[in-house]
C-alpha cells in the first residue's frame, strides 16, 4: 500500500518550521575588493584579472574603500551596529574557482551586527532579525562542458573564468526566524524582496538574481509543534529567483516532514535547488566552521571606521522602501494589498508616470494591470518593457480626453511596444480614434436596430437595460472604435 503524501496544511498542523536566510550581494563597485580589476558583467572570460585576484605568489591585497562604505551603509539601513574595529579573516578551502585556495572573508569580527528589517505580508508585519552583515570576495566561475545540464555530472572537462574572482560580496545573515508557521515560505520571499528593494534604494548593487548579483541560501528545519528543540537544518543553495525562495522553503518543509513521519532523521547538509522541478537534491554534507581553519588575514590592516565617518554615511541613506511605500500609499490613496502588489520597480514607474502628469489611479491601473500582465507574459521585469512613463502618461491623457477608449488604448500600447512611436503617433498612424461623429454612428445604430427587431421592441416597451445588446452590436461593427456612451444615447433617443 502506498501512503499518499500529507498535504502542506496537514504538515504545518503538526510541525513548526524555522527558517534562516543567507543572502550574498555582489556590490556594484567599479573595481574588485582587493585589486583594481574592473567588475563588468559578461566580459570575455579571464580578461578582468591580475596577480592579486589570480592569487599569484607575492601579490598583496588592498581593501576597496568604496566596498567598505557600501557595506556600512547596508548595515545602517538594516539597523545594525557598526564595529569600531574588525578584521578580515582567511577561510581556507580548496576549490578550482578560488585561485588562492582561501577566501578573504570575515569570521568572528563582522563589520555589522544585530539589525532587523520589517517585512509586510498582507497586512501582517514580521520582524526579521539580522545576525550579521560582512564583507568578503566572490569566487570565480566554473563551467562544465559536455554534460547535458551544464553540471559537473556527465561533463568531459571544466573551464574556469576568474573575472568574478575578487568581486566584493556582502553576506547578510538572518537570525533563525520562528513563529511564521505555514507562512514561512511567503515570509522568506517577502524578506528577500524587501532586502532587494533596500539594496536597490541604496544603489549598492544591481541586485539581479538571474545574473547572480543577488544569491540566496535558505536554511530550513522542522520540529514537532510541542518540541522545545529545533530540528536539524538543511541549507538549500542555487535559489535564483524570488519565486524560488518561496518554492524552496515549501518543498523542503514537505520533504523533511516525509522523512520525519517515516521515523527518519534529517541530515545536516547542503542541498541544490532545481528551478525546473522545484525540488532539491543533496549536495555535500555541511562543513563546520572549524573545517575552514579561519585565522585573521595577515596581509590586511584591521578595519576601524571612525564614528564621524559612520555618521556621514548615515546622512547619505536614501528614503527606505518601507517609508516610501507609506508615503506613496497615503499620497495616492492606495489600499494596503494594492501597495503590497507593487514592488519598488513598479513604484518607480508609477511615480514617474504621475510626475509626467497622469492621475495616480490611472498610472497604477496601467502599470499594475495591463503592463504587468504583458511583462509577465514576456517573462520580463516591468521596467524592461519598451514603454516609458511619459508614454503611459500620454496614453492616459488620450483616454481622459475621449480621443480613445480603454480598448483602443490597449491597441495603441501594442504599437508603442512594437516601436511605432509615442501613443499619439500610433493612434494617428493606426487610425484608432474613437468614432463619435453622429452621422457615422447613426448609420451603425440603425443597422443594429434593424438586425435585432425583438431587442428594439423590448426597449420600446420600457426595458432600457436591453440596450446593452445593441450597444455591443454597434461596438462590434465599429471594431470597438465607437464612443459607447454616445451609442447608448443614440439608441435610446431613437427607441424611447
Ligand atoms: Zn585583479
Image (cartoon, grey):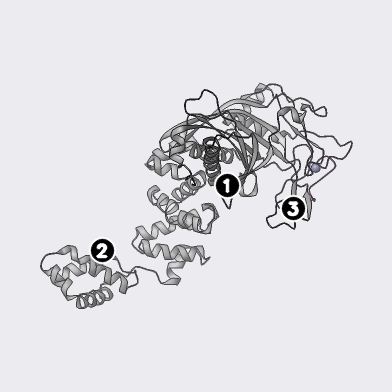
Q: Which residue is mark 1?
A: 279
Where on the picture, by quarter, is residue 450?
bottom left
Q: Image point 62% across, 29% down: which residue?
A: 313
> Furthest-left residue in view?
461
Q: Image point 43% across, 39% down: which residue?
A: 9
Quadrant for ligand 1 reads: top right
| 3 or 2: mark nearer the eye | 3
Residue interval drawn in magenta? 35-61
Q: Which residue is mark 2?
A: 485
Q: Earlier in the sequence, mark 3 or mark 1?
A: 3
The Cα atoms of the two marked residues, 3 and 2, are separated by: 64 Å
Whether residue 42 appears in magenta in the rendering, the answer is yes
> Furthest-right residue in view?
58
Tell me the crowding category of disc 2: few under 14, some 14 to 19, or many 20 or more residues within 10 angstroms, Cα based: few
Q: Which residue is mark 3?
A: 144
| 3 or 1: mark nearer the eye | 1
Residue 216 seen in the figure: yes
In the image, residue 366 lies at what x, y percent? 42, 54
Name the one closer to the observer, 311 or 2. Answer: 2
Q: Secondary structure at mark 2?
A: helix
Above-or-below relation of 360 to 118: below
Whether residue 410 appears in magenta in the rendering, the answer is no
In the image, residue 45 lies at what x, y percent? 77, 52
Amino acid at each position: 500500500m502506498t501512503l499518499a503524501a500529507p498535504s502542506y496544511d496537514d504538515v504545518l498542523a503538526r510541525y513548526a518550521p524555522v527558517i534562516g536566510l543567507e543572502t550574498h550581494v555582489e556590490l556594484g563597485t567599479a573595481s574588485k575588493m582587493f585589486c583594481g580589476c574592473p567588475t563588468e558583467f559578461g566580459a570575455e572570460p579571464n580578461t578582468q584579472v591580475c596577480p592579486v585576484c589570480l592569487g599569484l605568489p607575492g601579490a598583496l591585497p588592498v581593501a576597496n574603500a568604496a566596498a567598505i562604505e557600501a557595506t556600512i551603509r547596508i548595515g545602517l539601513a538594516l539597523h545594525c551596529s557598526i564595529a569600531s574595529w574588525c578584521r578580515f579573516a582567511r577561510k581556507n578551502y580548496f576549490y578550482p574557482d578560488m585561485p588562492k585556495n582561501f577566501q578573504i572573508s570575515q569570521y568572528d569580527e563582522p563589520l555589522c551586527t544585530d539589525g532587523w528589517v520589517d517585512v509586510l505580508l498582507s497586512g501582517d508585519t514580521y520582524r526579521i532579525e539580522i545576525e550579521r552583515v560582512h564583507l568578503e570576495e566572490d569566487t570565480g566561475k566554473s563551467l562544465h562542458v559536455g554534460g547535458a545540464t551544464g553540471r559537473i555530472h556527465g561533463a568531459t572537462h571544466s573551464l574556469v573564468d576568474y573575472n568574478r574572482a575578487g568581486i566584493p560580496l556582502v553576506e547578510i545573515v538572518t537570525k533563525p526566524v520562528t513563529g511564521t508557521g505555514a507562512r514561512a515560505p511567503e515570509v522568506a520571499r517577502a524578506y528577500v524582496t524587501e532586502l532587494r528593494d533596500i539594496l536597490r534604494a541604496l544603489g549598492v548593487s544591481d541586485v539581479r538574481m538571474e545574473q547572480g548579483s543577488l544569491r540566496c541560501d535558505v536554511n530550513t528545519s522542522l520540529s514537532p509543534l510541542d518540541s522545545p528543540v529545533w530540528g536539524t537544518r538543511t541549507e538549500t543553495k542555487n535559489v535564483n529567483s524570488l519565486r524560488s525562495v518561496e518554492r524552496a522553503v515549501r518543498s523542503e518543509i514537505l520533504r523533511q516532514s516525509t522523512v520525519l513521519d517515516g521515523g527518519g532523521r534529517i541530515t545536516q547538509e547542503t542541498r541544490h535547488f532545481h528551478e525546473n522541478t522545484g525540488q532539491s537534491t543533496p549536495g555535500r554534507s555541511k562543513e563546520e566552521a572549524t573545517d575552514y581553519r579561519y585565522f585573521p588575514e595577515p596581509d590586511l590592516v584591521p578595519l576601524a571606521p571612525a564614528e564621524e565617518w559612520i555618521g556621514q554615511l548615515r546622512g547619505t541613506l536614501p528614503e527606505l522602501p518601507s517609508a516610501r511605500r507609506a508615503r506613496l500609499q497615503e499620497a495616492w490613496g492606495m489600499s494596503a494589498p494594492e501597495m503590497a502588489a507593487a514592488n519598488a520597480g513598479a513604484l518607480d514607474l508609477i511615480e514617474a508616470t504621475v510626475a509626467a502628469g497622469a492621475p495616480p489611479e490611472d498610472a497604477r491601473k496601467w502599470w499594475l494591470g495591463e503592463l504587468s500582465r504583458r511583462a509577465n507574459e514576456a517573462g520580463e521585469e516591468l521596467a524592461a518593457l519598451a514603454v516609458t512613463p511619459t508614454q503611459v502618461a500620454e496614453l492616459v491623457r488620450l483616454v481622459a480626453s475621449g480621443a480613445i477608449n480603454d480598448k483602443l488604448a490597449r491597441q495603441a500600447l501594442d504599437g508603442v511596444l512594437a516601436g511605432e512611436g509615442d501613443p499619439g503617433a500610433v493612434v494617428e498612424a493606426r487610425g484608432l480614434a474613437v468614432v463619435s461623429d453622429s452621422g457615422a454612428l447613426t448609420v451603425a445604430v440603425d443597422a443594429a436596430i434593424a438586425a435585432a427587431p425583438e431587442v428594439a421592441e423590448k426597449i420600446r416597451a420600457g426595458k432600457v437595460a436591453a440596450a446593452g445588446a445593441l450597444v455591443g452590436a454597434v461596438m462590434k461593427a465599429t471594431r470597438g472604435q465607437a464612443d459607447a456612451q454616445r451609442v447608448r444615447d443614440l439608441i435610446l433617443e431613437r427607441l424611447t
